[in-house]
Image: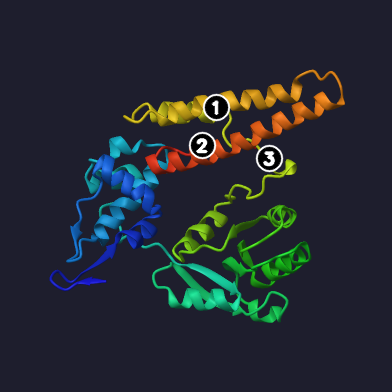
Amino acid sequence: MTNTAQRQPVYRSGVAARLAGLSVETLRVWERRYGVSDTQRSEHGQRLYTAEQVRRLGLLKQLVDNGHPIGTLAALPLERLEELAGVGGSAPPLHIAALRVALVGETLARRVAAAAGLGLDVQRTASRLDGDMAALQGPPLDVLLLELPEPDESMVPLVAAAREAAGAAAVVVLYRFCASATIRALRAQDCMVARMPSEMGELAQLCRAALAGRQLPPSDRSAAAVPAIRFDETALATITAAGNRLACECPRHLSDLLLMVGSFERYSAQCASRNEADAQLHLDLGHAAGLARSVLETAMERLVLAEGLPLPPAPN
């Protein structure tokens, strides 16, 4: 939208957050706790961000990702942020290029076409996965976005073929109902698998996460679904040290819980068993601890992102 008085482009908070590479939740936390934005408001009370403010938010995100605590960055002027980020004052305005995508699914294509400001540049579409693959062929793309309401394992080779046809660097599969075995098979092919979002604004976030190589936590809770450890002791120590700069002590408390649950998970796997039933009991205990760890790790990742703390890489 445009401010007619100043003739400057201004953006609502959701669009500003997407352009800066932030989640809206993180932007709100940064504003509430650190006062990172001095925004104007529309006549309806909505926050409006100028291109310069969006650029500043983008620099803050970049620096936080590089390990700088948001608490020490929030009050710095734009020029100092540019200096820390290694860009000059004459740098062009922040512009986040739209992701080049191919879509599979008629309903998905209509919803994307009807939504504005998603940050998705739709270059090719196909109505069905088992249709003509030629519709997906062309220059390489960033993401292949597929709408598969009830996928099964027979579709996994078709997804791989569609990815090759589109030349996509990443694949996002959106479903409504799906068996856990199919989800695992798709993830084994490096696909991002997620339930169909109710808000179209989540699509770009899913696509960017897929390009970054991140996966969503498994949606099933079967015995085979315990994920690998996301935060080892070194990563938790890093988060705790960074979180010490915050008034909130949740990072430290959550780290303590994860260390305790992870320790019990390993203990259950090593505990001596008196008989077959006892062995099964310890297997079930370890499985329950693993699921609890996964839930807590998901909570930790949300907390880290919301507080602007550095996110340690996943263990190899």
Give the quarter of the figure containing the N terminus.
bottom left
* Label 1 sits on residue: 234
Q: Is residue 149 visible in this depiction of the protein?
A: yes
* Label 2 sits on residue: 312
Give the quarter of the figure containing the C terminus.
top right
Residue positioned 64% across, 68% down in the render: 149
Judge depth for marks 2 and 3 and give the one in front: 3
Alpha-carbon neighbours of circle 2 within 10 Å: few (<14), some, or many (≥20)?
Answer: some
SS at badge 3: loop
In the rendered structure, which amino acid carries the disc numbered 2? Pro
Percent position (x, y) of residue 159? Answer: 70, 66
In the rendered structure, which amino acid carries the disc numbered 1? Thr
Percent position (x, y) of residue 51? Answer: 26, 61
Residue 54 appears left or right of 185: left
Residue positioned 79% across, 18% down in the render: 272
Alpha-carbon neighbours of circle 1 within 10 Å: few (<14), some, or many (≥20)?
Answer: few
